[in-house]
Amino acid sequence: MKILALSDIHGNEYNLRKILLENKNNIDAITISGDITNFGNYNDLKNILDIIDEIRIPYFYILGNCDPKEFKNGIESKGICVESKCEKIDNITILGAGGSTFTPFNTLFEISEDELINNLKKAICEEITILLTHNPPYASIVDLTKYKIHVGSKKLREFILQYSPKIYQCGHIHEARGKEIIGNTLVFNPGPVIRGY
């Protein structure tokens, strides 16, 4: 199965359409690790999900800190929101939790590390193929800011080491596009759609 990993769309329709057009004939599913809108509302979120619906490929998503928290469980009939849920497609199990830990910017969907971990543990699956969060794990390539400061979640790192998902997709830190292995898990940030990734 080929999966297109997206993050940090921030409402950028042009880049999203371009990426979907380039990949739609070569993928079986899409995963989105948050920040679908840019401090948007219901209509902004629905508009972006409508664009993804056009290519008729299953997609799984969580919201990020720049998305409206009141829709953290998704929009009916728009893809599969994996907020505090495990979902399956073929032999792949996806577990997700959205939002981000607290930032200095007071964004729309911020929660404590404990709440983030509890949201994941509520829905823990026997075997996790893909763990999908917006927040990155601490002390990794994917949580390093342009100022070389690690800003990820220590508890997410512990979660990875305890549950060993095969793949962990995150976003949030736009400049931290990359991948590495933590424990037995491939951890990666696909890069922000808003910048063309």
Image (cartoon, rainbow, N blue to C red):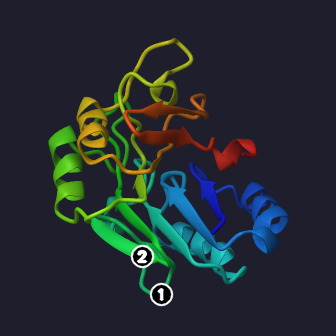
Reply above or below: 140 against 118: above
Residue 52 is at least partly visible in this image: yes
Residue ID for mark 1: 77
Secondary structure of the residue carrying tag 2 is strand
Q: Nearer the viewer, residue 105 or 9?
A: 9
Image location (x, y in percent) of residue 106: 33, 38
Q: Between marks 2 and 1, how big is the CA–CA gap?
A: 17 Å
| Crowd tier of the residue under label 1, counting other residues whose Cα lies within 10 Å: few below 14, some 14–19, many 20 or above | few
Specify the amino acid type for callout 1.
Ser
Q: Nearer the viewer, mark 2 or mark 1?
A: 2
Image location (x, y in percent) of residue 118: 16, 53
Image location (x, y in percent) of residue 133: 40, 50
Residue ID for mark 2: 88
Reply above or below: 161 against 115: above
Secondary structure of the residue carrying tag 1 is loop
Image location (x, y in percent) of residue 116: 23, 48
Q: Earlier in the sequence, mark 2 or mark 1?
A: 1
